Amino acid sequence: MDDVCEGKDFSFPKQEENILQLWTEIKAFETQLERTKDLPEYIFYDGPPFATGLPHYGHILAGTIKDIVTRYQSMRGHHVTRRFGWDCHGLPVEFEIDTKLGIKSREDVMKMGIDKYNEECRSIVTRYVTEWEKIVARTGRWIDFKNDYKTMDLNFMESVWWVFSQLFDKGLVYRGFKVMPYSTGCKTPLSNFEANSNYKEVPDPQIMAAFPIVDDLDGTAFVAWTTTPWTLPSNLALCVNANFVYVKVRNKLNGKIYIVAESRLSELPIEKPKKGVLNGSGKESENSNSKTKGSSGGKTKNVGDTYEVLDKFSGASLMGTKYIPLFDYFVEFSDVAFRVVADDYVTSDSGTGIVHCAPAFGEDDYRVCIENQMITKGENLIVAVDDDGCFTAKITDFSGRYIKDADKDIIQAVKDKGRLVKSGSFTHPYPFCWRSDTPLIYRAVPSWFVAVEKLKDQLLENNKQTYWVPDFVKEKRFHNWLENARDWAVSRSRFWGTPLPVWISEDGEETVVMDSIDKLEKLSGVKVTDLHRHNIDHITIPSSRGPNFGVLRRVEDVFDCWFESGSMPYAYIHYPFENAELFENNFPGHFVAEGLDQTRGWFYTLMVLSTALFGKPAFRNLICNGLVLAEDGKKMSKRLKNYPSPMEVINDYGADALRLYIINSPVVRAEPLRFKKDGVYGVVKDVFLPWYNAYRFLVQNAKRLEVEGFPPFIPVDQITLQKSSNVLDQWINSATQSLVRFVQQEMDGYRLYTVVPYLLKFLDNLTNIYVRFNRKRLKGRTGEEDCRTALSTLYHVLLTSCKAMAPFTPFFTEVLYQNLRKVCNGSEESIHFCSFPQEDGERVERIEQSVNRMMTIIDLARNIRERHNKPLKTPLREMVVVHPDTEFLGDIAGKLKEYVQEELNVKSVVTCNDLLKYSSLRAEPDFSVLGKRLGKSMGIVAKEVKAMSQENILAFEKTGEVTVASHCLKLTDIKIIRGFKRPDNMTEEEIDAAGDGDVLVILDLHPDESLFEAGVAREVVNRIQKLRKKASLEPTDMVEVYFKSLDADKSISQQILNSQELYIRDVLGSSLLPSSMIPSHAVILNEESFHGISNLSFVITLARPALVFNSDAILTLYAGNTKFAQGLQTYLLSRDHHNLKSEFQCGNGKIKVDCIENQPAVDVVLGEHVFLTVGDYLSTKSR
């Protein structure tokens, strides 16, 4: 394996770019697809985005989820085709072209020519494709851009035609009018989903108008309320609620008589009498300027002071009453219209209880007028507002004017007719077009519909067959949407889209729906190479009834782009014209993932079309993500610049960190995420740096074997490692199997958000338990064989965890894998060609539990030390561990004892399974649980519970229940409180304890002079380790450490160093050397003085290993020639220390020196003529 740098020098973004280059060189994605082509298919549907804008965090989030799942499924033995898709048609594109070319109306497009307009649209569709490909690839997502699909492709559009034709043949398509949200800015109707996406608080006019009853002698008038004065010219009816009580009232001041709902009488204006004016007409009402719907502006006068109730009657009795219309634009409807009808949609929470109906501009208005035979379904409804939102010539007084601009003049016209009862304004949430940002209106449009309401029961049943994460979106939001599903208007009166494949005869009697290009070509005799409007609108079909009946022409509409995206599972593979076997063997698809907003968008259209076509859901598994918000909780806004760009974050911290950050957040559970760049840095700090440091520790110590002259590191096979007697080897192998099992279990359940917390815990255990507690073994202090076992265990743990995490962090795992594979023959070229790891090894749950408890013991003991200001460097005499599980105590006293002692610096560890020896138990009833249940009995039960003996409490814990005052109580009903029972005549400063409810830890805190020397040794070692760090030394860098006492009495420090020599050598890997032995030619790396360390002062010096010569022996080599002896020493000092050591090892401790000019050749023997280090020299001398 190659050397690796320190974590602070490791650039995650730079390494990711290197991996991208590697993937390109080995064609990694293409190779993976080729290698898995004969494996079972895993079908993934990628919802197509528009390419007219750049990707944002929402795209990256959904893309990351899709990439993780598809990478995982590929590693699990599937062939996963991943083709990128583009939504090319529809409003976003047309709106951009309209803005660019200054197109304001439909006529502007017709003047320009549909062909030129559509080609303009086509020209911008793929504007950002290159940027998309670059950004998506940089996030680590593997997806095929070269074989992408576009909704404007001929094959895709042909399959959309086939889908529509199937629905038509099933009787699920009809043509009619539908009042829909309509954008005058984009000149098209919108889906309800689109209409609900952009609400704003805006002021609107509100007026009450009078509608006098025909031939009423008193001039009685109905009073209707509206917030859309522009709809009044199209009024055809008034609607009441048959169940309401209505009142006929007379204004005491001006004599006018009105009819309103009794519950809304207070909304009528209160008149202010003017001096000198008798009960005349033309009085101004006290207009309200209320801010909330239905309020009356806060009247202070009683309505009874102004109005006298003349009569009361039910709403049902008013039905059929004729009234005088406000305007005469629709006088031709007089025989059937301008009368009162009744319906339950009229409510009493606003207005007057009487609603004015303009069927072309209200969904309920349209329905009610059809039900009352004022208009007929399917007829050409007169819509007096054109596509641009302007009045048509039908409304002569306001012809050509934009409806919202005409509101004031319409109100004035009502006033001039003496029919204005009240006017004002109010502020309310109003829908705006999500593209043009213009106010929406409701407008009847001729449209082609899919009869979704016929499919409702089957849609609900199919929804039950799907699996969603999170499931509440399926059970609540999506279910409710399906429950209230309405027929879907799938056509748009636009230009750039897939044209409806419907040809109709001039008399409307003959309709032909094309299901293929071939059918169109055969019926028309025209070759077809493109299906857009400008290429097929001219094509006619001869009538099957003969030449006398003329030809059939295509209807002008195009498909709503939601119909196209809902057809994606069929159209992207050109089904049924191609890939029939692939589709039919793998439908429904296995997986889709998009945002929460798609419950009313793509998820819905997928479900509707698949149910209509095949009676099945379109997908089996779905992950629904929430919205990514700016850090302040607001929507991310380019204008506000309230979020960092994705590429900025990736360039700073890497794509893997961004991937883990977003999937380890509420957003993967369909909740919002407040994006914080610091959060991405937190992932680097908490996940990747510990992970990297564990890997770096492995590489450094594997390289150290070679540095020290041992054979290169080759990992021991896993079967052999499973037999390791070391408890931490057994534990980490078991923990790794648990990680593999957990990741597989959660990924099979599509719960991505649970994986990162588990990985964090695993990495913490790997670095802070396995590596930390095994430093001696990993550094070779316990012998070469044991070192290789520990290194091999760490190697396989890292390799296995990398494979398990490869779908989540494709770059970092590849970086590690590319180095790890260098010591493993027959390894795959990329980690992403590997299979997902299997649970090969045995999981030892007891060992995992024991180690977890050991860490609890260590934490509890540290807490006691902190409470008493006893740092870990201070050795303690004894620790007692109390627990009822004898197997666990056996582990602590046996396999795990040395780790506990070393980590906590305690001389002795004692175990005890007698819970009452060191602790007292008392029982307390849980009042919050028992209070309501026991009622008056609570007092008696509480008294008896508190009186339970120690033995009774232990028995209760064992059996799990106890009967108290004839009530059966469970473990959840009683709290067991454990208190430390301190031995007699001992204070808290002498002995203390801590517990977590499971295990109790007791520390003997007595000062012990016999442990003083061990404490000093730890202090000295601690200073040496810090000095190494200051010198930027790697663990594999060999140094010699020299000690010099600065005390007057140097014997104290010397005695301590002598008594603690084994400990110091064990930790440092070498003995402390007296500073007097530093050779004059030694290279000093760092030196520092320390004062008052356990009342001692000293100097520590770090130096490179330096040669020590036996001058007498060398002089003998040259028969007393001092010049030759000096020449040999000079030559040896000039040599690289590491290379010289290797030569001695190769020569079994002897080298021949025959290269010194004018000197005889000699054999130099290690340990006789020269020593490689001062330590070697001293150890030989001591022997």
Image (cartoon, rainbow, N blue to C red):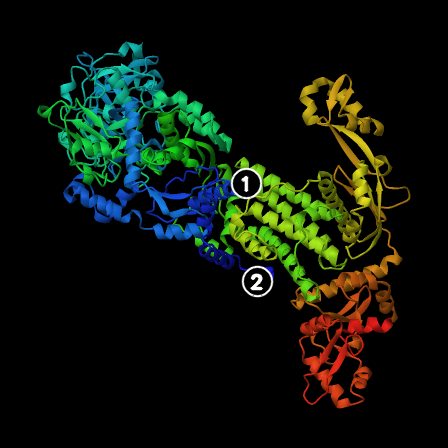
Say whether residue 295 is visible.
no
Q: Position of residue 929 (x, y in %)?
A: 68, 25
Give amino acid for label 1: Tyr
Q: Residue 145 placed where, x, y %?
A: 38, 48
| SS for dot 1 | helix
Q: 334 or 88, which lies in front?
A: 88
Earlier sequence position, callout 2 versus callout 1: 2
Q: Residue at x 74, y 22 (%)?
A: 969
Tally of numbered tags: 2
Q: Quadrant of the C terminus?
A: bottom right
Q: Is residue 214 above or below residue 293?
A: above
In the picture, the disc for residue 753 is: 1
Report whether 153 appears left or right of 983: left
In the image, is 321 to the left or to the right of 873?
left
Q: Position of residue 720 (x, y in %)?
A: 70, 48
Q: Is residue 269 above or below residue 1128?
A: above
Q: Secondary structure at mark 2?
A: helix
Against 113, is 399 above or below?
A: above
Residue highlighted by disc 2: 9
Name the amino acid, label 2. Asp
Instruction: Mark yes or no: residue 651 visible.
Output: yes
In the displayed structure image, the side of residue 601 where residue 110 appears, left or right = left
- Residue placed furthest toward the right: 985
Please say if the residues under marks 2 and 1 sit with CB atoms less than 8 Å apart: no
Q: Which label is found at residue 578?
A: none
Question: As drawn, which residue projects farthest toward the left?
Answer: 548
> What crowding class fits label 1: few (fewer than 14 Cα within 10 Å), some (14-19), or many (20 or more)?
many
In percent of width and height, residue 251 lies at 27, 18
- Above/below status of 1075 relative to 110: below
Q: Which residue occupies the foreground of this view, 17 or 523?
A: 523
**Looking at the image, which residue is at 63% across and 40% down?**
839
